[in-house]
Every structure is written in structure tokens, then in C-alpha cells.
Amino acid sequence: MNELVYVSGSFRPAAEATVSVFDHGLLYGDGIFEGIRAYNGRVFKLERHIDRLFDSAKAIRLQIPHSHAEVCAIVVESCRRNGITDGYIRLVVTRGAGDLGLDPRNCSRAELIVIVKASLSLYRSPSSGIRVVTSTFRRHSPETLSPSIKSLNYLNNILARIEANDRQADEALMLDVHGYVAEASVDNFFIVTDGALLTPPTANNLEGVTRETLLEIAGTLGIGTEEQPFTLFDVWTAKEAFICGTAAEVVPVVSVDDRTIGTGTVGPLTSRIAAAYHEVVRAQGTPINAGSGDDSRLPESLVLGACPTN
């Protein structure tokens, strides 16, 4: 099946899925996105992800040209049309085509794009653990840009990843402006201390859906959790560490800044959390191919030309 992308109000072959060179998402990074996963014929936490998409849009005063329910339906239909059972879904909302100049009033209508991939791999050997280095680039202060906004401007993160590449590492760990651990270049970060999970508060990093899912899972497993600031010393001396995100899932960290974490292998608590996560995501979610009585199928009015605005 040819890959189909939802763009400009219809599904188009990937080779024909384009946006204007005057789109402010391209010109200025003016837009937002979400990454979502499908497992076992279901879209995991679809509504939660779309909630966050609309929150990001509200924060930057971007009017998404669809209702919450319509966006959910477009995501599910994108999976159906691409024959997805397990896969990765990327939603992008740009400010839309306008003119040169930052003023968003130049853009008459936002653009929604939905891309679906059957697979996505971020790291070479995620199951055996990755090597991480601390970046010299700091995460933006919340006074500069809220980390809760999943914006299209990822240059800060990209510079950190380039630095990790130059140092032959798999991932970069970023600190905030005060020197506390924030997050990896595209993922949240956890360490294990004395049997408990410790993760930075969301004041300095993204409130990840995978992050909150793991905190929920830890509670059901009777594993203690704490959300508080911590330093590189805490990381270097941790018993275990891992990163997590929608695309990455749960990935063990076996070294940070050439310091071995724990035994240098995948730790028992990380293994336990990862196993439980894999069970949860494969058992829950919005069905992609529901019965004939399912009313979430995308209305034809949303795929035959321009979609109505709210």
C-alpha cells in the first residue's frame, strides 16, 4: 500500500504531500506537533495526545482548523488508510501559508498534517542500553519558552544531538539554566535511587505522555516515585537510568559522560517498568478498525477538499 499523508484537507500519496514555501511553519518554526503510537490495532492515549496538541495551540494562539473530535477521527482514519496495526503517528499543525515577516496575522488558515509510519527507530541498540553525554547547550528557561509547548522549533535540541553525535554518543542529556537535569534531546529522563524512580519536575521539561504513563505504572507496581530537581552527581551515582518517550518507549541508559550507571547493564527496575509498559500500551487505546457501528470514521466532508473551521 502506498503511504498516504493527510494534508490540506485530504489524503495524498506521500510524494505529493506538500505545503507552501510561504508556510510559517517552514519559515519560522511557527507551529506545534504531537507524536503518537499505535499498538495491536489501537491508538494509545489518543485523546490525551490531542488534548496536549490543543493546549500547545492555545498557548501560541494558533487556531486548529478542526474540532478535537475531528482531529481524533483524522488520526484513526490515517491509520486505517495506511493499513497500520503497529506504528508511529506524527501530527503537525503549522500557522499556514502567509508572507515573509513574523506577523501571524499574515496567515489566513492553519495547516494540519498527519503522517503515519509502520516503524520508527531512534537508537541502534535500545534494548541493551544507550550511551549518553551531557550537552553544553542548556534547555530554554520557562521564562523564554514554556517546555510544555511542543513547538516546531527544535533547534536547541538539534544542537545538543549534534554534540552527542560528535562525541559518538547515542543521546544528549540537557540541563536547565540552573544546572539541574532537564531532559534528553527528545525524551524524558528517569533515574533509580534506592528502589525509587526519580524524574525532574515538568517546570523545566516536557510533560510527556509516556512519562506520566510510567508514573502511573510505577504506582500500580508499588514502586515509589518522586518528581524533584536533581543534578549530574545524582545521575552519575544512580543505580539505574532510562529515557522514555512515545517514539523511544523505554530505553535503558548504561553510561553518562563515560561513567557507568549501576552495573553497566539493564537494571532490574528498568526491566520491570519496561515490561509493564509494553503490556499496557498493547492492551489499551482507541480501536483503528472498529465495527460497522463505529461513529469515529472520518466524515467525507473532511477528506474532499478544505475542512471547515471551528
Image: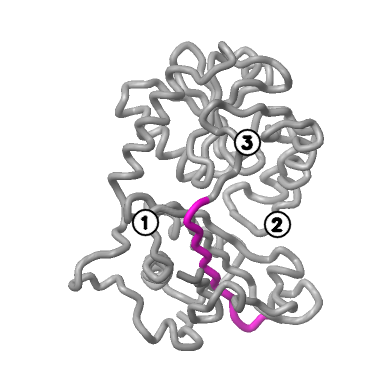
Instruction: Specify whether residue 221 is painted magenta.
Output: no
- Tag 2 secondary structure: loop
Asked if the residues shown at circle 1 and circle 3 are in contact, with their CB atoms under 8 angstroms apart, the answer is no
> Which residue is label 1 attached to?
85
Mark 1, other Cα within 10 Å: few <14 / some 14–19 / many ≥20? some
Pinpoint residue 26: horizontal percent, then vertical percent. 72, 69
Q: Earlier in the sequence, mark 1 or mark 3?
A: 1
- Seen in the picture, residue 162 relative to 287 is either above or below; the reply is above
Quadrant in the picture for residue 129: top right
Give whichever of 261, 118 is nearer the camera.
118
Q: Position of residue 39 (x, y in %)?
A: 37, 50
Amino acid type shown at disc 2: Asn
Badge 1 or badge 2: first in the primary sequence: 1
Name the residue that disc number 2 marks: 153
Q: Position of residue 148 (x, y in %)?
A: 57, 49
Q: Amino acid at mark 1?
A: Thr
Q: Which mark is residue 183?
A: 3
Provide the secondary structure element on which disc 1 rests: loop
- Element carrying mark 3: strand
Horizontally, residue 221 falls left or right of residue 262, namely left
